[in-house]
Image (spheres, grey):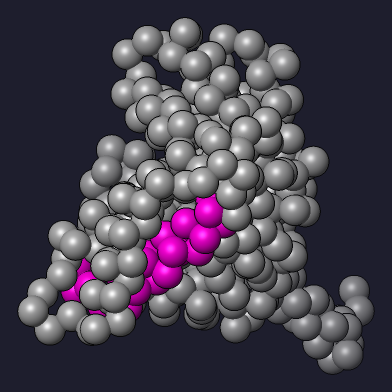
């Protein structure tokens, strides 16, 4: 029998070595995949534990579990976003900001990461920066329900602006969502209240009237409608709205307060339509009397001579009878005097000048 040539022997040996290497590669790949699968399972287990701890309010332990999960799967953005939420809930705002900064450095369009960052900065009192991140969340990328998440982000921003009393910014955010907001009564009532805070009572009136048509027993809607019409100076309409609210909820102290205020204004306001000259004169005299009394209560020894002169003029005016035919002319003079007294009070008196009293509201209306 012929012996194998050296070349044949080499090829056979090479084949065996190749097969051994291939076997080791397959075994190594299998072990690596197994290890990765086991690591993924462990990370998922730790992450699930962290989520459960967050739901129970144990945010410190949750942070530890989720951190362990992140250590196994460092690039998992879901884990990192949830870690930031746990850090925020646990009061670790600096850590949450650091976590989110890393996420946003790699993807600045991440909607959820921007939203959480906005919450973090709001918690830290950095409101202008928070507003910026809420805007990024509104226009950012979302994995699921993008439209719904953007709407919810805008609603969070709206609540922040309402707390900060940023009327112009608040109105600018309310307008795009007015027709897109959920149609449930609670959300619509909240929107009406927000339009009031934003200084847009006319839009608030539209929202609340729509609710009243659909739910005529809704006390909150009648109260909101009354406040909106009151803000527009329509005291008669507001009076009816608060009466409706009280009929539905007789013990509602807020509605009763507003109704009492409407009643006082309707009895005092000399600019209401349908008043005769004599009634208008009597109301103007009442305004002078109330303004004089308010100024007298805050006088001190160092009051300006001009203020004393106004008080003396008011005393004479209240005692002087009015000739027939001069009621309208005298009423105008009285209104001018009452307004001068009120402006002098703002300037001279140390005690704060009330802005929501019937006198203040009527004089503000007269001045327009």
Picture coordinates of residue 148, whole percent (x, y) = 71, 44
The residue nearer to you, when weighing 85 against 287, is 287
Q: Residue furthest left?
A: 301
Q: Is residue 337 magenta?
A: yes
Q: Is residue 70 left or right of residue 103?
A: left
Q: Please name the residue shown 47% across and 47% down the image.
A: 322
Q: Is residue 1 magenta?
A: no
Q: Please name the residue shown 51% across and 78% down the image.
A: 129
Picture coordinates of residue 345, whole percent (x, y) = 30, 69
The residue nearer to you, when weighing 365 against 109, is 365
| Residue 211 to residue 279: above or below | above
Picture coordinates of residue 363, whole percent (x, y) = 48, 55
Image quarter where the C terminus lies is bottom right
Q: In this picture, which residue range is highlighted in magenta?
A: 330-351
Confirm whether residue 74 shows in the render.
no
| Residue 132 to residue 267: above or below | below
The residue nearer to you, when weighing 231 against 156, is 231
């Amino acid at each position: 029998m012929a012996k194998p040539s050296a070349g044949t022997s080499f090829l056979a040996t090479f084949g065996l070595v190749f097969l051994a290497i291939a076997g080791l590669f397959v075994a190594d790949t299998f072990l690596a995949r197994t290890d990765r699968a086991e690591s993924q399972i462990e990370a998922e287990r730790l992450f699930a534990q962290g989520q459960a701890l967050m739901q129970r309010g144990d945010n410190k332990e949750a942070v530890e579990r989720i951190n362990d999960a992140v250590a196994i799967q460092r690039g998992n953005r879901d884990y990192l976003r949830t870690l930031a939420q746990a850090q925020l809930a646990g009061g670790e705002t600096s850590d949450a900001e650091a976590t989110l900064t890393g996420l946003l450095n790699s993807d600045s369009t991440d909607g959820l990461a921007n939203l959480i960052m906005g919450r973090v900065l709001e918690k830290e009192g950095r409101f202008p920066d928070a507003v910026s991140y809420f805007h990024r969340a509104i226009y950012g990328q979302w994995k699921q329900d993008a439209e719904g998440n953007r709407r919810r982000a805008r609603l969070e921003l709206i609540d922040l602006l309402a707390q900060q009393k940023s009327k112009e910014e608040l109105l600018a955010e309310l307008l795009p969502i007015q027709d897109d907001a959920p149609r449930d009564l609670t959300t619509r009532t909240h929107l009406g209240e927000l339009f009031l805070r934003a200084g847009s009572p006319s839009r608030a009136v539209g929202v609340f009237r729509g609710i009243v048509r659909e739910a005529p027993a809704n006390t909150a809607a009648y109260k909101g409608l009354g406040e909106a019409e009151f803000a527009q100076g329509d005291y008669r309409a507001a009076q009816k709205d608060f009466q409706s609210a009280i009929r539905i909820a007789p013990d509602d102290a807020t509605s009763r307060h507003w109704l009492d205020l409407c009643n006082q204004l309707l009895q005092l306001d000399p600019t209401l339509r349908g008043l005769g000259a004599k009634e208008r004169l009597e109301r103007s005299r009442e305004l002078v009397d109330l303004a004089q009394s308010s100024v007298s209560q805050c006088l001190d020894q160092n009051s300006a001579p001009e203020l004393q002169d106004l008080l003396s003029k008011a005393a004479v005016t209240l005692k002087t009878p009015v000739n027939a035919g001069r009621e309208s002319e005298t009423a105008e003079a009285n209104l001018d005097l009452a307004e001068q007294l009120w402006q002098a009070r703002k300037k001279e008196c140390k005690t704060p000048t009330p802005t929501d009293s019937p006198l203040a509201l009527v004089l503000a209306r007269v001045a327009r």
